C-alpha cells in the first residue's frame, strides 16, 4: 500500500495539471464525496483551480465570499482543519458559512493548506455529503499530496509572472542564490529545489528581488526555521 501511494505521489508530481489530477483521484482514494483546490488570500488571489463537482466549487465560492470557513483557517494557521460534522459542530466557529450551507449537500469538510516554506497561499477542501471522519493515515496522505500540489501551484504562478528563473542574469548573482539555497536547505531540511522555491516565494510575497532575499539570507539577516512542523521566517 505504501508503494502504491508513493507511486501516486510521483504521478501527481508529474501531472500536467496537479490540482485537477488530485481532484480526479480523491474520491477513489479517500472516504469523501469530492474536493476542490484553490488559491486564497492576498498572495495569489482567491480562485478555484480545480473541483470535482459543482458542490465542491460552490463550497469554495461561499468561503471566498464570506471570508470564513475551514479553508481560511487552514491558510491562516498553516495546519489542516478537520470538521467531520460541520452542521452540528461548526456553527460557533463559522456561523455564516454553516447557515449558507443549509441547502447544500455538505456534512463534513476537511481543509489542508497549500504551503511552501512560510508562504501560505491556498487550500485543498475535501467534503462529504454524509458525516465521516478522516483517519490519521488518510490525513497524512492528503497532507503529502497537498505538499506536491503546493509546489507545483507556486511554480506555475511564478512562471506565469516571469519570476521562476529570476537571478539577476549574471554569474555573481547565480552564485549568491546558489549559496543562499544551500543555507536554506540546511536550515529547514528540504531539497535544493524546494529551498530555491522557498526563496522565490518569499521574494514574491515581499515584493523584493530574489537577489536581495539571497543577500539577506547569506548575511544572517533572514533565516528560516521549523516550528511545530511549520516553516517560519526569522528576521
Image (spheres, rainbow, N blue to C red):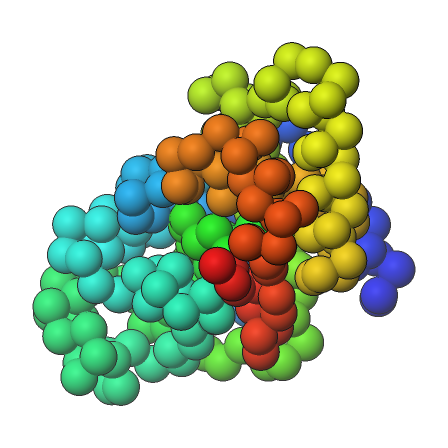
> Would residue 142 be found to the left or right of residue 208 on screen?
right
Relative to the observer, which residue lies in front, 87 or 148?
A: 148
For residue 141, say whether it is visible: yes
> Would residue 235 be found to the left or right of residue 15 on screen?
left
Asked if residue 50 is positioned above or below residue 90 in the image, the reply reads: above
**Rendering coords of residue 109 (x, y %):** 38, 68
**Rendering coords of residue 50 (x, y %):** 44, 39
Asked if residue 112 is positioned above or below residue 172 in the image, the reply reads: below
**Total residue callouts:** 0
Q: Residue at x 21, y 63 (%)?
A: 68
Relative to the observer, which residue lies in front, 113 or 223?
A: 223
**Rendering coords of residue 185 (x, y %):** 75, 52
In the picture, which quadrant includes the N terminus? bottom right
For residue 34, say whether it is visible: no
Q: Residue at x 57, y 63 (%)?
A: 231
Q: Residue at x 22, y 50 (%)?
A: 64
Q: Residue furthest front?
A: 219
Query: Which quarter of the figure has residue 44?
Result: top left
Q: Residue at x 18, y 57 (%)?
A: 67
**Rendering coords of residue 143 (x, y %):** 60, 63
Asked if residue 117 is positioned above or below residue 80 in the image, the reply reads: above
> Would residue 197 be found to the left or right of residue 49 on screen?
right
Relative to the observer, which residue lies in front, 233 or 52?
A: 233
Amino acid at each position: 500500500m505504501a508503494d502504491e501511494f508513493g507511486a501516486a505521489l510521483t504521478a501527481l508530481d508529474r501531472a500536467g495539471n496537479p490540482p485537477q489530477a488530485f481532484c480526479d483521484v480523491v474520491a477513489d482514494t479517500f472516504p469523501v464525496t469530492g474536493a476542490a483546490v484553490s488559491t486564497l488570500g492576498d498572495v495569489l488571489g482567491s480562485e478555484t483551480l480545480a473541483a470535482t463537482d459543482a458542490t465542491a466549487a460552490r463550497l469554495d465560492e461561499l468561503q471566498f465570499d464570506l471570508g470564513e470557513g475551514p479553508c481560511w483557517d487552514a491558510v491562516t494557521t498553516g495546519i489542516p482543519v478537520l470538521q467531520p460534522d460541520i452542521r452540528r459542530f461548526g456553527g460557533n466557529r463559522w456561523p455564516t458559512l454553516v447557515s449558507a450551507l443549509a441547502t447544500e449537500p455538505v456534512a463534513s469538510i476537511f481543509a489542508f493548506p497549500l504551503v511552501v516554506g512560510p508562504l501560505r497561499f491556498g487550500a485543498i477542501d475535501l467534503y462529504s455529503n454524509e458525516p465521516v471522519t478522516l483517519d490519521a493515515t488518510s490525513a497524512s496522505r492528503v497532507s503529502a499530496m497537498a505538499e506536491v500540489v503546493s509546489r507545483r501551484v507556486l511554480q506555475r504562478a511564478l512562471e506565469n509572472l516571469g519570476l521562476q528563473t529570476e537571478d539577476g542574469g549574471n554569474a555573481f548573482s547565480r552564485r549568491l542564490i546558489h549559496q543562499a539555497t544551500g543555507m536554506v536547505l540546511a536550515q529547514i531540511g528540504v531539497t535544493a529545489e524546494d529551498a530555491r522555491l522557498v526563496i522565490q516565494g518569499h521574494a514574491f510575497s515581499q515584493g523584493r528581488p530574489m537577489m536581495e532575499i539571497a543577500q539577506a539570507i547569506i548575511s544572517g539577516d533572514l533565516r528560516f526555521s521549523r516550528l511545530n512542523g511549520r516553516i517560519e521566517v526569522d528576521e
